[in-house]
Amino acid sequence: MSPDDLWAALAGPLGVLDARPDFRLDPAVDGAAGAHCTAYAALRAQAPHIDLPLAALVTHPALGALIAEGNPDALELAHELIALGAPVDRQVSWFSHRTYLEWYPDIAAAGMNPLMHYLRFGWVEGGRRTLADLHQGLHRGRQPLRPDLPTLLVCTHSLASGADPALVDLLRHPGLGGHNLILAALSGGPMLETLLPECCAVLITPHPLREMPHIDDAGFDRIDTAILSSAEAALFAHPLVAQEIPFAVCLADYPDPPLARWKSRCVTAFADLLVFSSDHLRDRWAGRLADVGADAGTDGVVIPPRPLIAGTVAPADRQAARTALSRAVGQDLDGRRVICGTGPLDWRHGPDLFAQAARIAARSHPEMLFVWVCTGLDRHEPCRDAAFGRHLRDLCADGPVILLRDGPPADRVMQAADAMFLSARQAALPEAVFDAVSHGLPVVCLDRATGFADARYRRAGLITVVAPGDPSDALTALSATPATVVPPQAPAPWRDAILSALRMRLARQRLAAVGESRFDIPQLFSASEADRPRRRREREKLFRLDRRVLWRDADHARAVVAASDNWLHHRLRIEDDRPLPTDADLPPFAIHMHAFHLDDLAADLGGHLAFARASRIVITTDTPAKAARIGAMADGLGLTVQVLVVPNQGRDILPFLRLFGRGGAAGDDLIWCHLHQKKSLRAAAHGDRWRRFLHRVLLGDGGGLSSALGQIAAPGVGLVAPFDPHVVSWDDQRPLLPGVADRFPGLLPDHPLLFPLGNMFWTRADVAREMLALFTEDYPWPAEPIPDDGTVYHLIERLWPAVAARMGLASVFIHNPDEARI
Amino acid sequence: MIIIHVQGHRQPSDLADLLASSPDGVILAGTATAVGEGGPDAVLRLVMLQAQDDAFVVLSHCLHHFRHVLATRPGALRYHRGAGIGPEPRDDAPLTWQADANGRVTACHLSPLAAGSPLLRPAAMRLAAVPMRDTRRFAFLRAVLQGGSHVPG
């Protein structure tokens, strides 16, 4: 087929031939007579390299043939056809104008032609994907897609070997049938080839939300349910929520770093079912679940990925393994009891505890030989933690323990061993224990340090749990004869058990919510108008699961607060903002502002009538130079301001609390507003909007006063703060709660529900003094720099209502729907 | 299973009677205050954040959002606007309904066979998204469930 015939066949249906019978002449493009007047010719004159990405985009067979045979007009024809846009662009190539603009809103915002951008810049820069990249990431599996079966999507973060043990467990029993299996991964790896025979399709995409809707595969059009193999695959929650596909998440590791906080929050908030591999792990996730209002009993289930199956080692194999180990360690093993351990040389895996036990055993159990098989890519290097490495070297001096870095592999050592000591301080369900038990080894582990300490795993008879902290207990257990081994019952394959639990969870659903809720604040999706339906779906799911992430509206918050039976919640109240008249009769009040950043300070001081009405304004800052600038600002605004230079410690809140301490400047003022500049290097625009929200709700504007002032002046009120649409919990402050819990008249609630989010509020001097007394002035306050979460200062932010309630005072949260929070 | 489309902001006072007459369960659909909280397991709640007057839309929401629950409870499905008497179930009709003088559908009945039809939920969702009179939506749905092409005007 000639280029002209192709042009007529493909462009003709669009009705462009009348105006443009020859694709080489585009009336919209200026050019010299006789020359090719097309966008392609113009672009190629500036950027000759465009032919390479252009040729790679073409999918149309006839067009591809013309390019392959070197037809001089072929690439120009390809460009002009693609440039026609939908539907021709997708008919002839991997390029879609609509998709490119959807994936890259910056190109749309800049008003650039997407095809021109990709060919001239995007391809050269790299990182700009087209449907060709998506196609390359889609791999057809060997299993046919059966329309009579439901389709299960299993999502993982990586197909690299050993990167995702849960994925291996999920796919351990191939060919069981019952559903079509498709797989999606954020990144590829060697496991792909081993998985293709079990699946209908495998997709590798780093951008599931934006790319999954464009996959040309029947399996991805009809997903019924999904399983995320770990919280690391949290990005897949986005398209699943967008498409209303129910999903379970396997949580076989701890909710601690390196797992990012947003991932644990995403999966606990949006998963229909959370699957834990042990009770131990479920306990460790309990705080994260409580943070979003998930219930470990209703929303979570413990399903072991597989049973512990005890095996044996043939005598000849054992003898050979002991001979090999004897050579490797340079010791005669006759009459020795070999205790093995394995793992990376780090604090978490506890090789130091293993070595401590070995040192003690050298005196009390000289027949024992301790062998640690080092694993991990850096097993030849010194420990990353140099201090830990030195400590370990000291413990291993004089040879009580043998570190095998290059000796026989772990399974060979297990064949030669008599017992395993799992000395890990934190190891959810290490594969080495399954291996050890399969070699018939009794395993001794530390209580509360591993899922194998669960009764459900101990039932097999080969696990002994000892208290942490006393290696002699471990030695006693390691020298004991193992109990009778109990053969496990054959459980359902993990994948089937999870799907069954998910079905049961979905069938227990008792609540649904439909429609637009009052607070439209993005969680998984963008704030764009195009994403509004997705945002509605995400909130509908949150409300259906009864998760605490966003309030539906103020009445929802009022209802939840009213339904609580906690003493603290009884003192919480939400009131609508009703601005006070400017001549309102108010008691004297003082305002404290901590100003570390001064950028917007003048605008803040001049933008609120409340500053002019305040009986006193105190501004704290950290340097004399800043203090001088603040003084000049205040003079310019005609405000009387007391500026105090304080140490840069305790963010905004410690300078405020210290006003009420020994020699503090609070004086006799009874009512105080605490403000700060709410600046963050990481969230400038967002932070500015939030600060404006907080300041306006607390103070009012330039012409009026907030009802917050009237509320704090009312008898029985100890705290007034803005009502925030977000529901925020103790979060990383939860571990700090036991340190203060006994100072309150009742149990602190599992969820605070309301507190002055952002740490700006009105309060009474007595309440501030009580807060300071809770910790005492001599508390070892952390110095800067401090993390963004998990400090005593963040705990104080959450404790204000509790301190007020302890004094019998209410906390009032002002709801002003007219002020934008985000 | 019976869907009670709660009118106004008050929970139905005869919840116990409803549960007795519909042991498979009751879905209360309405505003948050109208459907309330808690209660026995057999009571399901569909909170409509914006008031919804169309019976068909309420039915489609229930079919969609409680699809996993309904899948475990085969049987007839009824809809009532507030309290009232629904149409007499007819074995030969997959879907029957009744409307008031203003043309508002006040009750409907889906036979067990129709309620278990795989066509029901997708058809109801598509029809609910089309702007048309409720009675016409029900007529279309009946035609779908009967497998026929004739839709009364």
Image: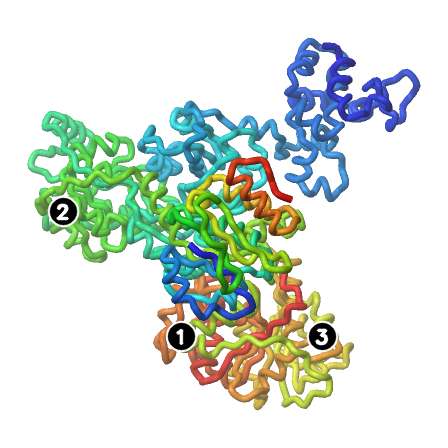
| Spot occupied by residue A547 in the image (x, y as percentages of width and height) | 46, 59
**Residue that numbered label 1 is attached to:** A566
Q: Name the residue at 26% across, 37% down.
A: A373
Left or right side of A641 for A743? left
Q: Residues within 10 Å of mark 3 (few under 14, many from 20)?
A: some
| Residue picked out by circle 2 | A478
Q: How is the image coloured?
A: rainbow
Measured as percent of width and height from the top left, residue B85 is found at 49, 61
A791 or A148: nearer the viewer = A148
The quadrant in which the C terminus of chain A is found is bottom right
Write down the quadrant of residue A612 in the picture: bottom right
Do the residues under discs 1 and 3 have CB atoms within 8 angstroms? no
Q: Chain of mark 3?
A: A
Please tell me how crowded label 1 is: few (under 14), some (14-19), or many (20+) other residues with Cα within 10 Å. Answer: some
Asked if labels 1 and 3 share a chain, the reply is yes
User: Which three-letter amino acid code belongs to the residue tagged 2?
Assistant: Leu
A527 relative position to B25: left or right: right
Question: Is A718 placed above or below A140 here?
Answer: below
Residue found at x 55% / y 63%: A552
Q: Secondary structure at mark 3?
A: loop
* Amino acid on which disc 1 is placed: Asn
Q: Nearer the viewer, residue A740 or A193?
A: A193
Residue at horizontal 45 percent and vertical 39 percent from the top? A224
**Contact between labelled residues 1 and 2, with CB atoms less than 8 Å apart:** no
The CA span between labels 2 and 1 is: 47 Å
Question: Split into 4 quadrants, where in the image is the N terminus of chain A?
Answer: top right
